[in-house]
Amino acid sequence: MATLLTAAALLAAAAPAPGGDPSPVEPPAETQLEAASQPTVEPPAAQLAWLEEVGPLLGDEEREVFLALGRDYQREAFIERFWELRDPFPGTGRNEFRETWEARLELARSRYRRLDGDRAKTLLLAGPPRRTFTDPCPGELRPVEIWLYDRVEGLAGGFALFFVRGAGGSPDGWSHWSPLRGLPLSFGRPGSPLPSEPAAMARLATDCPRGRDVVDAFAQAVDWRMLNTRVDLVPRPSGEWARAFLARTTDLPEGAELLPASVTLAFPGRHQSRTVVQGLITVPREAAATGALGERPTHSFIVDGEVLREGRLFERFRYRFDLPADEAAGELPLAVQRFLRPGEYDLIFRVRDVNSQHGFRIEFPVHVPAVPRAAEATAVAEAPPPAAASGAVAAPAANREGAAGPRLAEANATGGDWLLAIQPLPEELLTGRVRVEARAEGDGIERVAFLLDGQPVMAKTRPPYSVELDLGQAPRLRTLEAVAFGAGGRELARDRVPVNAGPHRFGVRLLEPQPGSRHSTSLRARAEVDLPRGQKLDRLEFFLNETRLASLYQPPFVQPILLPPSRDITYVRAVAYLADGNATEDLVFINAPPGMDRLRINFVELFTSVLDSKGQPVQGLEREEFTVLEEGREQTIARFELVRDLPIHAGVLLDASTSMLEELPEAIRGALRFFEGVIKPKDRAAVVVFNDAPRLTVPFTNRHDVLAGGLSGLEAEGETALYDSLVFTFHYFAGLRGKRVVILLSDGEDSHSRHSFDEALDFAKRTGVAVYAIGINLPRRDTLVRSRLARLARETGGRPFFIQRAVELKKIYESIETELRSQYLLAYQSTHESGGDFREVEVRVARQGLEAKTVPGYYP
């Protein structure tokens, strides 16, 4: 009976939505064998010509991969990716480097006809010279051509290159001449040594009309091979991208064992203006090899796909599936989804069994139909795949219509097919009145309500679902929610996003399933990812409870999931990973009792310094010597370690107002020493300079030269907007995780801020950034400024310092570095389950004479 139910759920995924395509597409089975045996096609003349044109740019691995590609569309896609990686400004519509290269190609052809000579290659790589001399001293020098350059990218100052005819193996007869070989002289008695270089120089200068030009050029001459090795004349990306490109193609390796599989294609609905294209690949369980994922026996597959349109690669995708292994017979379902506009395409699937390396490949044409808007709500309402259920088997074709229809209806009635997503908010700090909008999908939505920090703001009864919010003038981390309601006030869908989370926020949101929704056999999981500025997503993984089912390497992040027959409480997790290993996740309970769908997990991390009576950091303490209290209630420490090498995000917030006129040069030198002493390769630092207003002069980087450049040329001028600059910096740090510190250097007197000290302090506590405040040359009678800097530091987990002159910074930076590299990380699961008020935290150490220093609390 379980096998029949599983089959019905599988077929429900392929059932067409009302008004959709009348039947699933089944590619002929023999297509697999035809595609697997298809021979490699040699590159056509145009692609071979391209290979010659970019010869000086190609690395060895790039060339090998290009020649290893077996199909024209793959090579065309390789060429596009090749240029993308060399685009100096990828955010623009132009590729300036490609344009420059093509202009140089045209010039090289017009001058030299062929591209494989030394002169043509040099022109391509270094560009045209400012000036050339050809045979400037006949009879004195061998036939020579001299190129003069003012400069090239990456090399300061001018230089000269010498080409000598007949001196090497260049195809056009003109070869590079190295100054290490001396002047390419032609005079001297046969059998007798040539004159010394100084004598030859003197002779050229007196006997040759252009001898002085030659002598000057030789003084600037460089060895071409050394220049081309030491200076990147052109972008040279690592060949790793080419290997990754080859690995993502859909060709089967030569001699690969074939994996039996079949494919069914369906168009179950639409997503905005596109049709949902769902491919269901089934693999006989007995043909799948078994491996281990941790201690769990698992069948693992990687599905690579390509979509071709008019013979060109339209998109590529990759999925990984990890399915629990058991002894039952049946088929393993692998489901993939793409959103395509109606039209004609060719689809290619390649399946690789990770445990056996057996492979399956199929290529076939498909017509993607237009699905009526009325069908939008049922797009993959209840779809299967990466299954936790066993015994999956495809039903006979004759039974498909009858098996799919009732099961889909039941799924829709219990699961719901509504989607609500708040549109992306601006990255900058938002205050005052701001308009936001939510996108809603699905029939029966009667109104969408907006809530700010849990308080109702406004409801709209028809699209566009937008509202103008009053965020107030104080900088705050806020929470915005949108809720879609149907008939009778029934909640259909909900979305929640943070406001003022900063440009570095890394987050994932599960838009489907909705919290607390009920599903019987299967569901659709859909996630959206917020990426930090400048970062790329590595993958997104979907879990059912703690079982990883599918890994997606590109949007759309939509995955059908088959549910086990058990009626136990179940949760779906989406975990997103960056290339550097950082991860973030979201979790939604389904089929849960009322109230559990609103459960929020609060995992708190405390970076804690332990100081002795002399203020020196203490190491070597054990977990048992620490006690953590939250609101007076003892918490269980789940993670404990001394974090000497945890990556740091540090910012120097430097006062460059008029009052810092005398101290600014030494403050700059002190900041540079801090970067050199603290910022290691895996750390990142930023520079914010302020007077009337803050300026981010260097975004996060680990390059000391770039950080130094952000501090160069500063002049003390203007007034002091200290509190506004603190708010600006905290917002820039918001969204980052781990150890984050701001080093503030100022004389402390604010004279130009819109925000108040209390607003800046509150925002600091909400973002969780530790402040090390250094007050320079503050009058002792100025107790208000001193007390505010001290409070700012202590209430954020940092320390205050007060010095008379900036020359004292060296010792302070050494102290901060020692403290940052010898902190304890104490992490716990908070026992408080609700409420958004500030929660007081205290860390105690059992040993006498020691003091534990951390943040005094946090906002959940």
Image (cartoon, grey):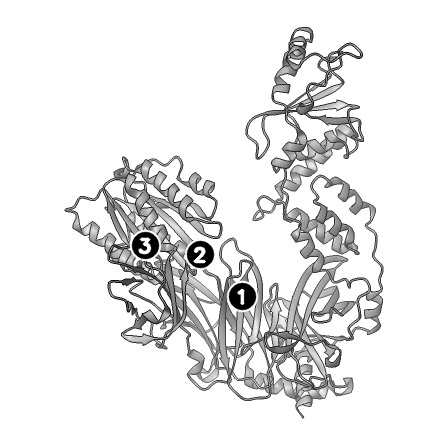
Asked if disc 2 and disc 1 are in contact, CB closer than 8 Å, the reply is no
Q: Quadrant of the rendered structure where residue 545 is?
A: bottom right
For marks 2 and 3, the one nearer the N-term is 2
Residue 223 image offset from top left, x and y in percent: 66, 28
Give the secondary structure at mark 3. strand
Q: Residue at x 66, y 39 (%)?
A: 99
Residue 576 - label: 1
- Residue hosting label 3: 771
Which numbered disc, 2 or 3, marks the residue closer to the eye? 2
Q: Nearer the viewer, mark 2 or mark 1?
A: 2
Q: CA distance from mark 3 to mark 1?
A: 30 Å
| Label 1: few (<14), some (14–19) or many (≥20) C-alpha neighbours in 10 Å | many
**Would you name the residue on which mark 2 appears?**
645
Residue 778 appears left or right of 303: left
Percent x, y for residue 490? 46, 83
Vertical side of 95 occupied by 421: above or below? below
Graded by Cα atoms within 10 Å as few (under 14), some (14 to 19) or many (20 or more), the crowding at tag 3 reads many
SS under mark 2: loop
The amino acid marked with disc number 2 is Asp
Q: Amino acid at mark 3?
A: Val
The x, y position of residue 254, in whole percent, is 81, 62
Q: Is residue 464 visible?
A: no
Please tell me how crowded label 2 is: few (under 14), some (14-19), or many (20+) other residues with Cα within 10 Å: few
Quarter where residue 164 is shown = top right
Please tell me which residue is depicted at 82% across the width and 73% down the height of the picture.
28
Is residue 158 shown left or right of residue 396? left
User: Disc 3 or disc 1, which is closer to the eye?
Assistant: 3
Residue 553 placed where, x, y %?
A: 61, 64
- The residue under label 1 is which amino acid type? Ala
Q: Residue at x 34, y 41 (%)?
A: 670
